[in-house]
Image (cartoon, rainbow, N blue to C red):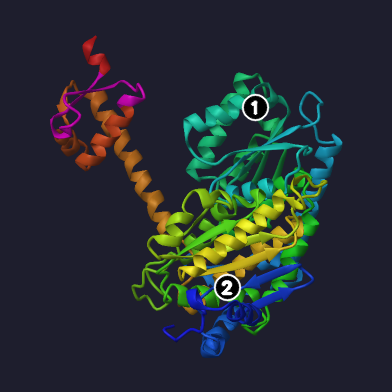
Amino acid sequence: MNAENDSPGATGTSEDHWRRYRAWLYVNRELDFYLDLSRMHLASDIDRRMASDFERAFAAMDALEAGEIANPDEDRMVGHYWLRRPELAPDPALTAAIRGDFRQVTEFARDVHDGVIATPAGERFRHLLVLGIGGSALGPQFVADALGSTSPPLSIAFLDNTDPDGFDRTLGALGKDLATTLVIVISKSGGTAETRNAMIETEAAFAANGLAFNRQAVAVTQPGSRLDRIATESEWLHRFPMYDWVGGRTSEMSVVGLLPAALQGIDVDEFLAGARLMDEATRIHSVRGNPAALLAMAWYPAGDGRGAKDMVILPYKDRLILFSRYLQQLIMESLGKARDLDGKPVRQGIAVYGNKGSTDQHAYVQQLREGIDNFFVTFIEVLRDRSGPEVWIDEGVTAGDYLSGFLQGTRAALAENGRQSLTITVGDVSERSVGALIALFERAVGLYATLVNINAYHQPGVEAGKRAASEVLASQRAICKWLDGNAGPIAIEALARHVGGAPETVYLTLRHLAANRRGILLEGDPAQPEKLMARREQDDR
């Protein structure tokens, strides 16, 4: 939208700001939720100008919730909204399955807490280790950090990569506590490399400590998957289902997120209730009365309808520091698309980054205020500072007062230089408010995707990366096989011709193998990789 806006900007008076604040304030009293768009450069009638676009977006969302195929690449529905209101599912069997899964989760968590489900030695489980990647880790990590107590029934740790040093650090920190650690392996297919590798490494750590991994392992996976077969054949402690109609980045309110949360003592009923209330608020076919539509409407002109500006997430609360990481996947994987629904090249997306306030005032807010104007800020304010008694920092002033002042000051300082921001305010950080925040952004992403005519529910670029990684590993196997069967040394480019690989890939693979003492020697000047010679170490014998 290139319409003129009536933002008061740097020259606006306090009365101008107050008038605009009142005009662009949305409040949901039941959720104790506020949304302020007054510092975005929005024309006063933008909602009227975009009315037909939003009618199309609302209709698309209604169709999605009714069970329309939303991911044509995999021929599947997208049903994360049904997770907090099962009766919306288009098939009674799905409704029953969702309710049954929730009962399984709550009963399993209760039995673990009560010691009915215990370790092979009869001890209560005290620790929780979650193995997953992407949506199978980001959501549970965010919720654990936001809502976890200082003394949960089970402490939680994650393996969410395929970094051997990361495995060593996490498993080493657990040490002897592995004996009282419950392991949840989350993978829809069971073939995701990062999660499979983490599972193998964890099994090895259990074996090294004389522990039976299967007696402490739980699978969350699609029925009939590779992981499901492994868990069945090895007689794991329990198996929970995942379904193809829940995508990874919207899976936090499925078993994927509810199981770890319930085991930590988080109130999953309230978590779902917050999302359900926000869903009700964001189903309204009125832009001004729908907070998700208001977000999508603000994003559209900010980035000229093509994501030209980044979204900076600044929560002024330590418990929400991981929200930006969670939103990175939700927004960037959903909106980062090469082609629109008509097959035309568009290169859409919105880049997301952030940390927390007031830390960011001592980091990159300098650039936000005075550097390149390629962003808009989403401030997240939490009204209630703490649950315990106050400590007075100055007369009549608490640390929370400072935090509120820093938020308001940064917001004003950005606006003085014409930098755009919006502010989301919640009453507290609770199961209900965190559930509502997740639901808000899920709906905003879906509506915005329709406005820019893309599919928010597939991720072809992710699959392309996985295929490329498989090709590298296939090349590695070919390189090692050739070196095993031939006396060296051999030049990089010659070896590449023998194995049918790209010279750069062959060099990078050899360098990695040599650095990790895998029996590969590289001889020559590393600054001239084309002259390096590769050979097996046993050639010296």
Q: Residue furthest top?
A: 541
- Please name whichever residue, 8 or 319, is drawn nearer the observer in this view of the structure: 8
Specify the label residue 369 is tagged with: none
- Please name whichever residue, 86 or 309, is drawn nearer the observer in this view of the structure: 309
Q: Name the residue under label 1.
A: 174
Indicate the amino acid at tag 1.
Answer: Leu
Can you say whether 272 is above or below 515 in the image? below
Image x and y of residue 149, in percent: 76, 43
Specify the label residue 295 is tagged with: 2
Q: Which residue is drawn at 42% across and 67% down?
A: 309
The mark nearer the N terminus, 1 or 2, is: 1
Quadrant of the image occupied by residue 510: top left
Query: In the rendered view of the protein, which quadrant contains the N terminus?
Result: bottom left
Asked whether the viewer can see residue 100, the reply is: no
Indicate the amino acid at tag 2.
Answer: Leu
Can you say whether 27 is above or below 482 in the image? below
Q: Is residue 370 left or right of residue 525?
A: right
Q: Residue furthest front?
A: 395
Residue 522 is covered by the magenta coloring? yes
User: Crowdedness of circle 1 by 10 Å Cα count: few (<14), some, many (20+)?
Assistant: some
Q: What element carries label 2?
A: helix
Q: Residue at x 74, y 58 (%)?
A: 428
Query: In the rendered view of the protein, which quadrant contains the C terminus?
Result: top left
Image x and y of residue 177, in percent: 70, 25
Q: In this view, does 30 lie to the left or right of 422?
A: right
Q: Distance between the residues labelled 1 and 2?
A: 42 Å
Image x and y of residue 536, in percent: 25, 20
Q: Residue at x 50, y 45 (%)?
A: 192
Which stretch did the figure color magenta? 514-536
Asked whether the viewer can see residue 237, the reply is: yes
